[in-house]
Image: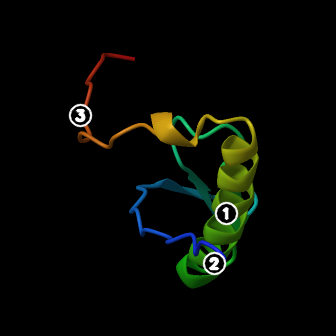
Amino acid sequence: MAEVKRLSKKKFFAYVEWDPVTKLYVGIIPNIPGAHSQGKTLEELNQNLKEVLELCLEEMEEMKDIEELPEFVGIQVVEVSV
């Protein structure tokens, strides 16, 4: 009998900005190379990020990097004078 591979769910956190020039939401998932996208709505951005993240994770799995995924800790605000 063939062994069934169980998939686990993992949450990832995206950094999202509004670009006033392109009028698009832009998102990046830190520490996952290539995991960035954009969308006209937050829903579209979320779907696009999900698709690109799945592709990035497939590539990482092939390279055996999937075991070393970063863990989200939090966000800090850094204030400087400009």
Q: Which amino acid does the dot numbered 2 rest on?
A: Gln
Percent coordinates x, y for residue 43 in the rendering: 56, 83
**Image point (49%, 39%), residue name:** 67
Q: What element does badge 3 sit on?
A: loop
Q: Which amino acid does the dot numbered 1 rest on?
A: Glu
Percent coordinates x, y for residue 62 in the rendering: 75, 44
Residue 79 occupies which quadrant of the picture? top left
Residue 74 occupies which quadrant of the picture? top left
Residue denoted by label 3: 76
Q: What element does badge 2 sit on?
A: helix
Q: CA distance from mark 1 to mark 3?
A: 27 Å
Q: Determine whether 79 is above or below 12 in the image.
A: above
Residue 78 shows which numbered tag?
Answer: none
Q: Nearer the viewer, mark 1 or mark 2?
A: 1
Q: Nearer the viewer, residue 19 or 69?
A: 69
| Within-10-Å neighbours for mark 1: few <14, some 14–19, many 20+ | few
On screen, residue 18 versus residue 77, left or right, reads right
Q: Are marks 1 and 2 in contact (CB under 8 Å)?
A: no
Residue denoted by label 1: 54
Q: Nearer the viewer, mark 1 or mark 3?
A: 1
Q: Determine whether 23 is above or below 55 in the image.
A: below
Residue 47 shows which numbered tag?
Answer: 2
Q: Nearer the viewer, residue 73 or 16?
A: 73
Q: Which amino acid does the dot numbered 3 rest on?
A: Gln
